[in-house]
Image: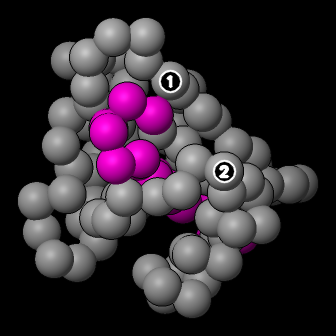
Amino acid sequence: MIWDQRVEVHVFNQPTDMRKSHDGLAAVCRNVMGHNPLSGQVFVFMNKRRDRVKALFWDGSGLCLYYKRLEAGQFTNLWRRDSPSRLSTMELRLILEGA
């Protein structure tokens, strides 16, 4: 995925039920993280095993959901703080590519 470098990337720091889709994740953005899911920012969610990641974002006409499942290994641990953290779009790209 390619996002503008000015886009804010917010990481939800708790394991997320990957059965949640657009509406469920938008509710987490709004009610738990305190952000507007229609803001154009990217919101990243990871499951407990850290082998699945979803990125929710508004593209100007609708909510989009990027979903990646690793066949082997785990994504980098993004849950290092007690509150939601932020990444640059470059950091997110590297994580999604397995760096």
- The amino acid type of the residue labelled 1 equals Arg
| Residue 45 place in picture, x, y as percent | 45, 53
| Residue 63 place in picture, x, y as percent | 78, 55
| Residue 15 place in picture, x, y as percent | 37, 58
Which numbered mark, 2 or 1, is in the foreground of this view?
2
Q: Residues within 10 Å of mark 1 (few under 14, many from 20)?
A: few
Task: Give the secondary structure at mark 1.
Answer: strand
Q: Which residue is mark 1?
A: 69
Instruction: Out of 19 and 38, give the one closest to the viewer.
Output: 19
What's the residue at 63%, 36% (across, down)? 66
Q: Which residue is mark 2?
A: 19
Instruction: Out of 14 and 12, give the one closest to the viewer.
Output: 14
What's the residue at 77%, 66% (across, down)? 23
54 vs 25, left or right, is left
Residue 76's quadrant in the figure?
top left
8 vs 1, left or right, is left
Give the spatial CA distance, label 2 vs label 1: 13 Å
Q: Earlier in the sequence, mark 2 or mark 1?
A: 2
- The amino acid type of the residue labelled 2 equals Arg
Q: Is residue 3 magenta?
A: no
